[in-house]
Amino acid sequence: MRLNPIITSLLAILILALLLGAAWIVLSPKGQLITDAAFSLKTISPNADGVDDITRINYRLREPASVSIYFVDSNGKRFEFRQKQPRDAGEHTLLFSGIVNGYVLPADQVNAKILRRVLPNGIYKWVIEAASAGDKGEVSGSITVEKADTILPDLKNLSASPSPFSPNQDGIADRATINVWLTKEVPQSNLRLTLIAPDDSEYPIAEAGSDILPGRAGLHTYDYDGGIDLGVNPPPDGNYVVRAEAEDKLGQKTQLETRLTIANSGLPRAEIVQGEVKWSSATVVIGQTLYFTVTVENYGTAPIRTFGPWSGTIYKQAENSNTLSFFEQDGAWRMKIVENGQTFYYLMPNQRAVISGGVILTDVIEARNPQYFWAGLIHEAVGISNINNRVDPKQVTIVKP
């Protein structure tokens, strides 16, 4: 029996459609993109008391997808928890403690930037969204938040001075004092200060010892030397951000920033060139002068400061810089920059200075005659380098006329 050509064509189309349908079923399995989504608790009380603080979120993905999780309050305001994060196919579990991305409420009087914050008390719709290359899916439900600790660890009055400051141990603006006020107690390690460079590199800043314990509410002070007291090169000169961050037990986190400029930074390094002192004589008649000449080089990265007595000074044997009214100045190295109306003298990096002077020898102890004379390079109130401590010792005989 021959079939009508029209019926034959219809049967061919039907068979083709069935084959294409079977192929689609094989290539794209049936089922939702996201399934089995649930919260383990329908009510949480995020206040760090250990009771119902955290709920477990479970969901399953049919295939790899980008996942977002958010909450919507009764007024339609949306609070983000996770945003478009890539996830593999299969089971997924994460914990939710009521903390979402930072947000601002109309009644807020918060000084710092809010990075993370707990949901206010209320009933919320939770939504888990998933999106893959060819599909989208969404699952939602309801959760109640009650007894939440909504007090933020706010930060106030962050200051850093002097600015600029110059960590180079010259005794002038070597240290920066940083103050910040914390309004709520946080775990000890959860109040952090960081110096942020223009290239986004970070330098941690340690808190100075004070009557306020780490993490306690109140004023916190930081004494920042750039690491130079530990013999570490300080951060390079430039304009920096001082960033303070506080995070409470719940995970609420705030951030406050101020500016700090670093100038003329570096480890001070100097030496007596070739370890040589040019002495005028090995024999000096009492009452006459023993002359000396040395060359000092700054081989470090920071300017080094001096203030006199100046080259060419002649001392009596019993005199020193203090008796000549050049009293000790912290950070000075014993050539011109004007700052705040004061004149300071510096030897710049890679420069040398020739220093000469003399000592009028007025006393002699026969038991120590001849006696040693040597040169030393002193960094006032910082240290005397072993390398520059006893340079080119010379035995000099003092004789009576």
Image: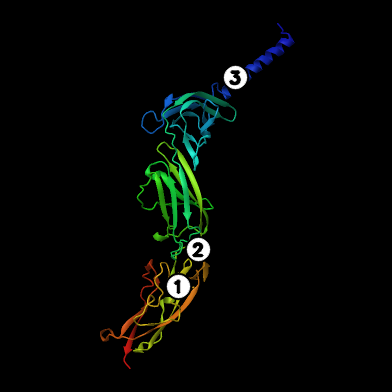
Residue found farthest to the top: 1
Q: Is residue 364 left or right of residue 292?
A: left
Q: Quadrant of residue 357?
A: bottom left
Q: Secondary structure at mark 3?
A: helix
Question: Label 2 amino acid?
Answer: Asn
Residue position for label 2:
264
Q: Quadrant of the N terminus?
A: top right
For residue 307, which numbered disc appears in the image?
1
- Give the number of the mark in front: 2 or 1: 1
Residue position for label 3:
22
Q: Is residue 320 visible?
A: yes
Question: Label 3 amino acid?
Answer: Ala
> In the depicted view, which residue is nearer to us: 30 or 119?
119
Q: Indicate how the structure is coloured in the image.
A: rainbow
Q: Are marks 3 and 2 in contact (CB under 8 Å)?
A: no
Q: Residue at x 43, y 65 (%)?
A: 171
- Give the number of the mark in front: 3 or 1: 1
Category of crowding for the residue at label 2, using alpha-carbon neighbours closer than 10 angstroms: few (below 14), some (14–19), many (at least 20): some
Q: Secondary structure at mark 2?
A: loop
Give how far apart the Cα atoms at labels 3 and 2 are.
76 Å
> In the depicted view, which residue is nearer to us: 48 or 397?
48
Q: Quadrant of residue 97?
A: top left
Q: Earlier in the sequence, mark 2 or mark 1?
A: 2
Residue 1 vertical placement versus 114 (above, below):
above
Q: Residue at x 40, y 51 (%)?
A: 207
Q: Earlier in the sequence, mark 3 or mark 2?
A: 3
> In the depicted view, which residue is nearer to us: 203 or 32?
203
Question: Label 1 amino acid?
Answer: Phe
Q: Residue at x 41, y 39 (%)?
A: 248
Q: Are marks 3 and 1 in contact (CB under 8 Å)?
A: no
Q: x and y percent of residue 223 in the render?
A: 41, 55
Q: Are marks 2 and 1 in contact (CB under 8 Å)?
A: no
